[in-house]
Amino acid sequence: MNDYPLLNVFLTMLWFFLWVMWFMLLFRVIADIFRDDGLGGWAKGGWTVFVCVLPFLGVFVYLIVRGRGMGERTVQRALAQEEAFRSYVREAAVEHPAPEATKADELAKLASLHDQGDITDAEFEAAKAKVLA
């Protein structure tokens, strides 16, 4: 039952999490290569081959050479997506404006409030006169 010491469990967990972090970094670099509009096709192919054939060296060289641009491109992409979303919402709001409440709708709401006892007779008559004016 005690064949696997606690320190080995911690070391195994450490190696596992480092392995997961490595793959996350590798996929992030590959995604950045393909999302970068500034790179041409041959450059993308070259970086991809370099990262796949010599992964450790390729990723580290890519981070040294193009690491600063990764963050900037991510921020630009996020801002562009946010602006596209806001533009879509603006267009959708113009195409489908909220319907205005008619006098009949307002009177129906007032009547339901009066029937429930939320407003008095005097308040109901005053609000009704205001709606009809």
Image (spheres, grey):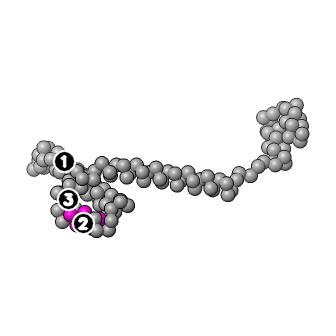
Q: Would you place residue 64 above or below residue 128 in this image?
A: below
Kindly tell me whether residue 108 is visible in this rendering: no
**Residue 14 got which mark?**
1
The mark that comes first in sequence, 2 or 1, is: 1
Amino acid under disc 2: Gly
Marks 2/1 in contact by CB < 8 Å: the verdict is no
Relative depth, front residue between 86 and 122: 86
Q: Is residue 34 left or right of residue 127?
A: left
Relative depth, front residue between 122 and 41: 41
Hey, which quadrant is residue 39 in on the image?
Answer: bottom left
**Residue 58 got which mark?**
3
Question: What residue range appears in magenta?
Answer: 44-50
Secondary element at tag 3: helix
Residue at 34% of width from left, 49% of height from top?
71
Q: Is residue 51 left or right of residue 89?
A: left
Relative depth, front residue between 62 and 38: 38
Nearer the camera: disc 3 or disc 1: 3
Q: Residue furthest left?
A: 3
Residue at 25% of width from left, 63% of height from top?
47
Q: Would you place residue 30 above or below residue 70 in this image?
A: below
Residue at 33% of width from left, 58% of height from top?
32
The mark that comes first in sequence, 3 or 1, is: 1
Secondary element at tag 1: helix
Q: Position of residue 9 (x, y in %)?
A: 16, 47
Amino acid under disc 1: Leu
Nearer the camera: disc 2 or disc 1: 2
- Dot 2: few (<14), some (14–19), or many (≥20) neighbours within 10 Å? few
Magenta residue check for 117: no
**Residue 46 got which mark?**
2
